Image: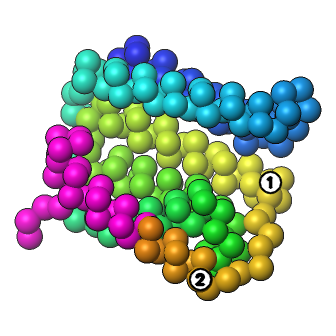
Amino acid sequence: MSIMLLGLSMFFVVHVLASIPSVRRAAVARAGENGWRGVVTINAFAGLGLVVLGWPNTPNPQLFAPSAAAIRLAPLAVTLALVLFVAGGFNFPGYLRARLHHPMVIGVLIWSLMHLFANGGLRETVLFGCFAAYSAFVLIVAVVFRKRAVVTPVLGADLKAAVIGLIAAGAVMHGHAWLFGVPALLPY
């Protein structure tokens, strides 16, 4: 578990710092915009790499029974989450970004909560719980500091996000068993 926890710590510490406006401004002033982005990117990939490396050796006792509703809703909810993730992550200037302001963070919150409730093991609870807590933290910081996306919405941007998100969802759903050892689509 220690390798996975180290990876999560690396990933989230730098992301939490990046979400606090005064800390981000100071870091950008010191390292420049590209330097700061480089630090965040390197830490994020290194952290995710350690999570992947530590995952198989992390004990996974069952903490609670998985939610049958979450298991059934997960394919639809995760598809929505991926569309939102794409809309925010690629900065598409669509109505999703204009209305939600932080669609990527909302997408991560939906994805993490669905996975959290659909599993119930220790390592899934730690992993998805961290992502859910971080996403909630970022949304609270955004509200407190009034961080809002200012875009002139273009419908084509939302269509692009939807198409890319749907393709990503299809790929993840069909490759989920191969990638993660658990099928995403259950027979009804």
Residue 129 in magenta stretch: no
Which residues fall within the magenta stretch? 165-188
- Front-most of residues 104 and 132: 104
Element under disc 2: helix
| Residue for badge 1 | 144
Viewport quadrant of the N terminus: top left
Say whether disc 2 or disc 1 marks the residue closer to the N-terminus. 1
Q: Quadrant of residue 50?
A: top left
Q: Position of residue 118 (x, y in %)?
A: 27, 51
Q: How many marks?
A: 2
Asked if residue 129 can be seen in this view, the reply is: yes
Of residues 91 and 75, which is closer to you in this image? 91
Q: Main secondary structure of the magenta part?
A: helix
Residue lying at 62% horizontally and 34% vertically, measured from the top left? 41
State the image coordinates of residue 63 (x, y, percent, origin top left): 26, 34
Position of the C terminus by quadrant: bottom left
Q: Is residue 99 left or right of residue 2?
A: right
Residue type (three-letter) at the residue carrying disc 2: Gly
Q: Where is residue 169 drawn, in percent x and y?
A: 34, 63
Residue at point 13%, 61% (across, down):
186
Circle 2 is placed at which residue position?
156
> Is disc 1 placed on a helix, strand or loop?
helix
Q: Give the answer, above or below, for where 121 lies relative to 56.
A: below
User: Who's the residue at 26% across and 18% down the image?
Assistant: 57
Q: Amino acid at mark 1?
A: Val
